[in-house]
Amino acid sequence: MSELPKLPAGRWLNEAEAGALLLTATGHLQRHLHESYARHQAERGRVVWETPSILTWHAWLERMWQERLIAGVGDADPTVLLRAAQSSTLWQQVLAADSTTRNLLHIGGLARQAETAWTLLHAWDLGPAVAAARDGRPEAARFAAWARSFGEHTNRRGWCDEAQLPGRVARWIVDGALPAPKRIVLAGFDVFDPAQHRTLDALARRGTHCMELESPACGANGADGTLQRVAFMDPEAEVEAAALWARTQLERGSATVGIVVQGLEARAGHVERIFRELLAPDAVLPGPNTQSLPFRLSFGPRLADTPLVRGAFRLLGLGRHALDLEPLEAGLLSPYLGGAVAERERRGLLVARLRKLGDPALGLDEVIRQAKQSCPELTRHLSAARHVRSRQSGRRSYAAWAQAFTDLLRALGWPGHGEGGRTLTSAEFLAYERWRDLLDELCGLDLVLPHADRGEALARLGELADATRFQPPGDPAPVQILGHLEAAGLSFDRLWVLGMDDSEWPRPPQPHPLLPFAVQRERGLPRASAERELRFAERVTARLKGSAPRMVLSYAEQQGGVRFRPSPLIVALPSVSPPDLGLPPQPRLADLLRQHVFAAAGSEPRGEEPLRSLPSGILQRSGTSIFEDMAACPFRAQARHRLGAEETPLPEPGLGSADHGSLLHSVLRQVWATLGNQASLLGQTDAALSALVKKAAREALNEFRSRHARLSAALADLESERLERLVLALLELERTQRPSFAVTASEQGLDATVGGVQVRLRLDRVDAIADGSRVLLDYKSGRASPMQWVGERPEAPQLPLYAIAHSSPPVAIAFVHVRSDEVRYAGVAARDVGIPGVVAWEGWRTGLKALMESAAVNVRARQQDTAASDDTDLFATGIRGWDDLLDHWRRVMASLGERFRAGEAAVDPQRMACKYCPLPGLCRIDELGSLARADEIEADGNVHDRKNGDED
């Protein structure tokens, strides 16, 4: 085909008004031309006008196919045009029938490669060349066999796929079976493949006047600084700078700004997040946002990732009899489940109640039984879904499954816009319509697939949703974010092109692995050779340079430790540094959130106000955790113990860390209830002691299994072995390394009033030593350190509270670490009590002071503000002995209790309090910038007990 005559860029509107057909290379350009045409008509004062004929090349081919069917000509030709999903499925069947590939775990990926090769085969007229080639590679030979099989399938059944369509349309045009348009304008084509050439030649022979729309020539040439090259440290900095630059151009009056990103399809989510934060920060704030975004990506999300369709898949999972708790919660809380708005809070409480049942998987009947207590609408929908689901079994056609899925979603009230629901947004409604199209595609699989069971049909539907891009139409945005190809045919006031490094532009050769390499290079196929990619990149770069009067081309100097240089196609351009672009400082999201929060409240930031004071003697059933939380952060204490805020973690399969700790406590309690003292322990043979521990472990596990059916017999056996090993190790330590003692209390309850707060304490164990003195012990399956007892805000106040609340002051307190990697004591005593790891007060005070002073120095060196720097005051306040230490703890605990009663609720976390706090979303400390991130000190490697399973 000879070169097409050029149509000046400004003349296409006249051609469109005169009835010419415009064919575009991309859907993005098609939408742009429709919008430009509508704007042109509105500017001329018109209210209505005839829709111009603007189609993508592929859509026009499909229209020609439909016209051929309507005309009823060519009876011997195929009568079915396969959809993309049908073609892909047929390719999978072809490969599955091949003995060399049928056992592949992921045949879908290879099928997609074969389908791409088949498309290239027809687009570039490679059939004879491939047949004659002597490539020598088994891949090419295998593809030739697959291609023959695929062609035989389609020919025998009267099918035509999208790859074969251009050749058939060209033949029908030449034969006169299809009408030929009088005038065609082609827009946005960087290159024409041979199949397109053949179609255009056929049109020309029928008298069609074909023209190619010239690319805009806006004149950026760099001579006056209109074309600039700039390097950034990494891709993240490059995208952020492009977003700030786009915002700056809009503020300076530019009407259209283009952002061209190499590899945009793979980076779309990351790019959108940065542009959303910098160009539309309101869009990342909580709550509904109806403001149009000032930018638009040419690549929409996968349909499967849109909230409404994701909700549909979650709800389709609710019909199963056994439901994993995490996806079950997502379904129950979905805004697309019927009655979601009316029952939103009650459904949240239901989810918390389901978590507390302790089972990571629940039957639908149990969920309905729980829902009946508070959620009548949810109960009605789940009951209806159960009834519908009971009739959806066995193997059936894909059309039948499409109807079954529709029935199930209808029973569940999806998409939730009925009574007690919410109004769908325009984007949601369009996604709903696209979902219906997706079900039609699922029905179409009956053409190429046998009947399927429910799981197979749902998996196919998921594959279709994953393969479908969803780009709802919307108002034109001033900032367009595009790939290199999507920018073809467009012009902008300003343009920034990212990713122009030497590794990606020109793109490295990557010939198709299933086609003969020599044939690909000879015919000039995409990615076949470095020479072809260089020519293509030069053409695209020249086209981009003409798309805007001012332009920035950028690249990242390194990524993942690999350094890059500028593309050879831009290395000669004037180079500037990032500061030369004059970009404004990047606004911090935390600052924007602070402004939003306090603007909504109608006030400026101010200090936290206390809650109402509580009377003295107030009863708190939360035990020592109230003092632990008050020491960690006053806000957490008030939120948990006065406002009832709580974390309900997902149950874990088998046993969680808290379960391990609880079972260990139970076994030790039973063992010492039998032994009573060390003398009895010493009198036991190894076999008798092992039998005693085994019996206690079995009884504890049997009692646990009566309440938690999720623990299987096999897991119970493993846990029994673990418990026996740990308890016997501790008993060996207590038999061989301790002087005489008796266990006088095990998990003893103790009522106490501290700082006006009445609490119920429970102590793991009280030992009486030879002189009658008491030693208080606390079992720990997690990590703990006596260092957590010091200061005005002790991290682990449990044992100090026991010490000051006990009827007679103890002589020692200690943690008993019972872990697979260590079994030991760690504590402090008034004097040497002969327990290894329990240090006499004077030695502990000396060592602890040195350790804490060292920690304080490290803290100051790192400019951190932690409790460690204040805790050194412990040794400057007159504490010289054991009694002074007990008095200190009485004062500290009384202060914590009084501050709690007074309603102190400052967001004032100490040390590692925020790392394991379950309520960060309530105090919003991260959002408001009150927390120093990432560089917190992990003093002594201590980990909060709540994270490690001690629930004492």
Image (cartoon, rainbow, N blue to C red):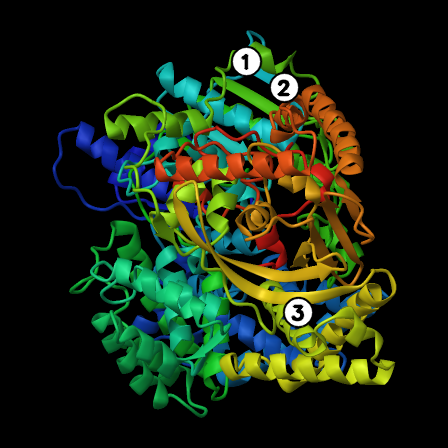
Which class describes the residues within 10 Å of circle 1: few (<14), some (14-19), or many (20+)? few
Residue indicated by mark 2: 230
**Residue 566 visible in the picture:** no
Front disc: 3 or 1: 3
Q: Which type of secondary structure does the marked residue at label 2 adopt?
A: strand
The residue at the point 34 percent across, 25 percent down is 595
Q: Amino acid at mark 3?
A: Leu
Q: Position of residue 879 (x, y in %)?
A: 66, 29
User: Mark 1 or 2 closer to N-term?
Assistant: 2
**Residue 718 visible in the picture:** yes
The residue at the point 56 percent across, 79 percent down is 704
Residue indicated by mark 3: 664
Q: Position of residue 656 (x, y in %)?
A: 60, 66
Q: Which type of secondary structure does the marked residue at label 1 adopt?
A: helix
Q: CA distance from mark 3 to mark 1?
A: 64 Å
Q: Is residue 552 left or right of residue 603?
A: right
Q: Which type of secondary structure does the marked residue at label 3 adopt?
A: helix
Which class describes the residues within 10 Å of circle 2: few (<14), some (14-19), or many (20+)? many
The residue closer to the viewer here, 485 or 387, is 387
Q: Position of residue 685 (x, y in %)?
A: 86, 82
Q: Quadrant of residue 560?
A: top right
Q: Is residue 376 left or right of residue 100?
A: left
The residue closer to the viewer here, 541 or 279, is 279
Front disc: 2 or 3: 3
Rendered view: 232 above or below 210: above
The residue at the point 39 percent across, 75 percent down is 318
Residue indicated by mark 1: 581
Rendered view: 752 above or below 674: above
Q: Position of residue 897 (x, y in %)?
A: 43, 40
Q: Quadrant of residue 468?
A: bottom left
Circles 1 and 2, Cβ within 8 Å, touching? The answer is: yes
